[in-house]
Amino acid sequence: MESSALFARLHDCTKDSSSDDEALAATYDNGIELIKDRVSQLGWEDMERLVAGMLKAMGYCARVTPKGPDGGRDVIASPDALGLESPRIVAEVKHRKGAVGAPAVRSFIGGLRAGDRGLYVSTGGFTKEARYEADRANVPVRLLDLDSFVRHYVEVHDKTDDETRSILPLTLIWWPVQEFQSINPYQPWYKLTGDVA
């Protein structure tokens, strides 16, 4: 469930004053910001493992490629363990402050094979030109900046394995609603465990 859909669902369930709605939105946004801060502190190897863990939680068999020149293939994911079924997702992970530009995205797209799907994760974001390159690609390519990655990760965190959870440990936050609903009346929120300065 997309984070906006999650907020809308919670908004519908609360049926409370606008100050409660504002507090709910602020709590969610604050949690996302804290998680983004924690992700920014990870090393590049942990970031690659976190991307692979997210893809596993989404139902793919994913693996981080061996260290060394990888030709833009940091993580490979497929519906089957052998990597023979489509769609095969090839992920490039750039974990640094600077935005990725059009030449890097163009090179990544050029390395994709027929039938591949591209996922480019850059915690430093993307330039406008890089987004344009992805939009006009002949193969499906999805760009995730830090905010987009964290919001996708939070949506599947409850399905991640222990190894992935050890990289980015989160805990649930519960929000009360005015009346019981047959759907889950208390939607979990994720927040970092431990103290964050």
Image (cartoon, rainbow, N blue to C red):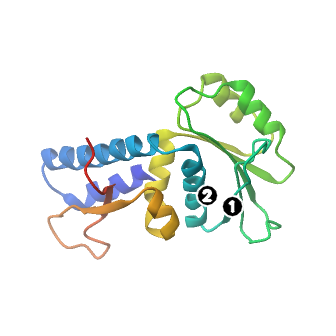
| Quadrant of residue 14 within the rendered picture | bottom left
Task: Evaluate if marks 2 and 1 touch, with contact meaning CB atoms under 8 Å apart.
Answer: yes
* Identity of the residue drawn at 19% across and 73% down: 180
The residues tagged by marks 2 and 1 sit, at their Cα atoms, a distance apart of: 6 Å
Residue 171 % position (x, y): 32, 62
Figure label count: 2
* Identity of the residue drawn at 68% across and 61% down: 63
Mark 2 crowdedness (10 Å alpha carbons): few <14, some 14-19, many ≥20: many
- Residue type at mark 1 is Arg
Q: Is residue 151 left or right of residue 58?
A: left
Mark 1 crowdedness (10 Å alpha carbons): few <14, some 14-19, many ≥20: many
**Looking at the image, is mark 2 or mark 1 earlier in the sequence?**
2
Question: If the image is split into quadrants, where does the C terminus sit?
Answer: top left
Q: Is residue 82 left or right of residue 64?
A: right
Relative to 149, say whether 128 is above or below. above
Q: Residue furthest front?
A: 68
Whether residue 1 is visible, yes or no, is: no
* Identity of the residue drawn at 73% across and 54% down: 65
Relative to 53, say whether 73 is above or below. above
Q: Which mark is residue 16?
A: none
Q: Which residue is mark 2?
A: 52
Q: Nearer the viewer, residue 20 or 56?
A: 56
Q: Nearer the viewer, residue 123 or 18?
A: 123
Q: Nearer the viewer, residue 141 or 35?
A: 35
* Identity of the residue drawn at 70% across and 48% down: 74
Relative to 130, say whether 196 is above or below. below
Q: Which residue is mark 1?
A: 63
Say what secondary structure mark 1 lies in.
strand
Q: Is residue 105 left or right of residue 24?
A: right
Residue 172 % position (x, y): 30, 63
Residue 26 % position (x, y): 24, 43
